[in-house]
Amino acid sequence: MTDTPALPAAAATAATPTPVYAESRNLSVIALVLGIASVLLGYTFIVPIAAIVVGVLGYRREPTGHTLAVWGIVLGAVMAFGWVVAGFFGVLFTLPFFFVGLF
């Protein structure tokens, strides 16, 4: 009988190929698309908030999509801030007419 040497455990595991999965950037791309859509569709308030939320999720979960997620967050935040400024000036300009009607 011939003795065949046993393979060490490290050599056995190194010989088996490990599957390589492509890292997804789906949330980051969606955040960027929502950020661009919030700029183009300026009369919506839900789209910028969705861009911020999806951008934060994409930033935390997808390390390869950080740049796309940051752009989605920035565009969504700029448009959401625009809504806050527009609301402030809307109240500021309509408030005197409200008080005139009371007297």
Image (cartoon, rainbow, N blue to C red):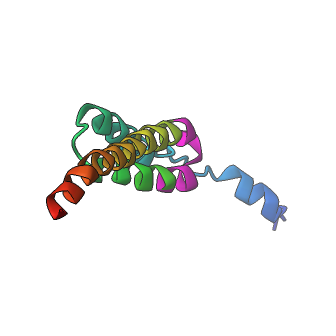
84 and 101: which one is in front? 101
Side of 75 relative to 46 (left or right): right
Expressed as whole percent of the image width and height from the top left, the position of residue 81 reads 42, 45
Q: Is residue 40 above or below residue 31?
A: above
State which quadrant residue 37 falls in.
top left
Q: Residue furthest front?
A: 103
In which quadrant of the rendered image does the C terminus lie?
bottom left
Quarter of the figure with the N terminus: bottom right
Is 77 rendered above or below residue 13?
above
* Dominant secondary structure (helix, strand or loop) of the stretch shown in magenta: helix
Q: What residue is at 79 percent from the left and 64 percent from the top?
A: 9
Q: Which of 53 and 15 lies nearest the eye of the viewer?
A: 53
The residues colored magenta run: 57-67
Q: Is residue 58 magenta?
A: yes
Count how many numbered circles sit on residues in the image.
Answer: 0
Q: Residue sitting at 23 percent across and 36 percent down?
A: 41
